[in-house]
Image (cartoon, helix red, strand yellow):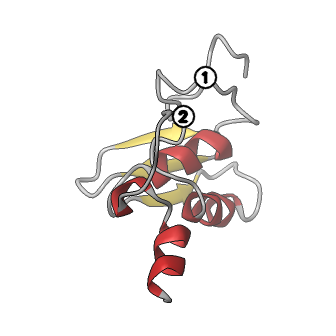
Amino acid sequence: MSVNRRCPAAHPDDPTACDGPVAVTVLDAGGAGADGCEHHAARLLASLHRGRVYALPHAADGAALRVFKAADGTRPFCWLDGPRTEPSQLSHAENRARHGD
């Protein structure tokens, strides 16, 4: 997938390119979703509250699990600049580390 034509999960303000084919669907808490490459799906999932990820039928084995794990260590809207100190601005992994979970 080219930089000019990115997957539906890529946020318009995220400057990064896709890392491969569309492989998963990310759903928000209300059930709305977007298909995406693993890279942009992880970034989208990290930016959602109570999001879910599902592999598409043609996806490589483990695609949804890789996205889930990558999202855990990715900050919400990670392409935005500025200080990140509030829990809502940190990754799930960072919040667990802060609270000793």
> What is the quadrant of the N terminus in the image?
top right
Q: In the shown orientation, is residue 87 left or right of residue 72?
A: left
Q: Which residue is mark 2?
A: 79
State the residue in front, 25 or 15: 15
- 76 above or below 35? below
Q: Residue at x 52, y 59 (%)?
A: 54
Within 10 Å of disc 2 (Cα), the crowding (few <14, some 14-19, many 20+) is few
Q: Amino acid at mark 2?
A: Trp
x and y percentages locating residue 7 in the rendered image:
58, 28
- 4 above or below 31? above
Q: Which residue is mark 1?
A: 15
x and y percentages locating residue 89 in the rendered image:
40, 53
How many labels sit on residues? 2
The residue furthest top is 4
Q: Residue at x 45, y 50 (%)?
A: 84
Q: Amino acid at mark 1?
A: Pro
State the residue in front, 32 or 49: 49
Within 10 Å of disc 1 (Cα), the crowding (few <14, some 14-19, many 20+) is few
The residue furthest bottom is 101
State how far apart marks 1 and 2 are (Cα): 8 Å
Q: Are marks 1 and 2 in contact (CB under 8 Å)?
A: yes
